[in-house]
Image: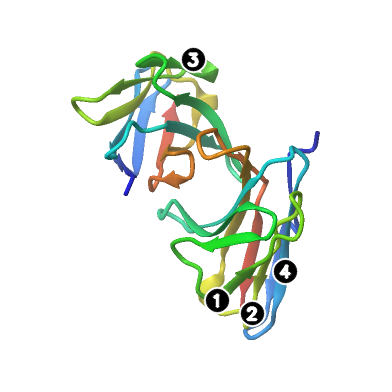
Amino acid sequence: AQSVTQLGSHVSVSEGALVLLRCNYSSSVPPYLFWYVQYPNQGLQLLLKYTSAATLVKGINGFEAEFKKSETSFHLTKPSAHMSDAAEYFCAVRGVRFGAGTRLTVKP
Amino acid sequence: NAGVTQTPKFRILKIGQSMTLQCAQDMNHNYMYWYRQDPGMGLKLIYYSVGAGITDKGEVPNGYNVSRSTTEDFPLRLELAAPSQTSVYFCASRSDGYTEAFFGQGTRLTVV
C-alpha cells in the first residue's frame, strides 16, 4: 500500500526565512506525489506534482519540491516565506492518499 | 467551468436526522471522492467512484452511503446522523488515477 507521512504538524517561520515542510512516502512502485495547499475555509488546491519527469519540481507561488528516491522523501521548500504562505499543506501519494497535514505559520 | 461544486456550505443536523451532501463536477472526470477533514487528522477517504455506476468504500465508510448515477454527480448520504459525523466534508474529482484532484469548497456539518 502507498502512504505518506508528514513530519511536523506545525511549522513556524519568520517572514523571509526558508520554508521546509517534510514528507516521506512509502510505495513499492514509482509514486506519483503531490503537494496541496489549503487556505482557511477553502478546499485544497494543487501546489505541484511529481510524475517522474524531473526530480526537482517547481510549483506555484515560488514553492518547489525534490524527489529523493534514496531517502523516500518529497520535501517542500520555499527560499523566502511570505505572510500569504500561511496555510495548511498536504502531501499526497497517487493524488488521493493524504498525509495528516502541516500548518505553516509565518511571523512578521 | 465551475469545477467541483458542493452544497450546502453549512448545515446543522440533529442526532438521528438524515441528509444528503451534494457534489457536482463539470470537467467530465471519471474519478470522484468524498473526504472528511477533522482537526489535525488530515483527510480521510470515505467513498470513491471510478465511473458512473461504480462506487467503493474508502477508509471510513461507516454511517455513509453514496451513489453515482451520472458522471457529473456524486452525492453522499448520511443516515442517522451522530455527533461523530461532525466534520468538514470535501468532494474531489480527477480525470484518472494519476492526475491531481480538484476539490470543492467543502461542507461544514455539525451534528447536535
| Location of residue B36 with respect to A88 vertically, above or below | below
Image quadrant where residue A51 sits: top left
- Rounded to the nearest whole Å, what is the CA distance between mark 1 and mark 4? 12 Å
Which type of secondary structure does the marked residue at label 3 adopt? helix
Q: Chain of mark 3?
A: A
Task: Assess whether mark 2 and mark 1 are in contact (beta carbons under 8 angstroms).
Answer: yes
Q: Residue at x 74, y 40 (%)?
A: B28
Residue at which label 1 appears: B63
Chain that bears disc 4? B
Mark 1 vs mark 3: tell me if same chain: no
Q: Amino acid at mark 2?
A: Glu
- Residue at disc 4, secondary structure: strand
**Residue under pointer 3:** A62
Q: Is residue A42 visible?
A: no
Q: Amino acid at mark 1?
A: Gly
Residue placed under numbered mark 2 in the picture? B79
Work out how far the residue at label 4 is from the one at label 2, CA to CA, in angstroms. Answer: 9 Å
Foreground tag (3 vs 4)? 4
Gap in angstroms between the C-alphas marked 3 and 2: 44 Å
Q: Is residue B95 visible?
A: yes
Which quarter of the image is occupied by the N terminus of chain B? top right
Q: Chain of mark 2?
A: B
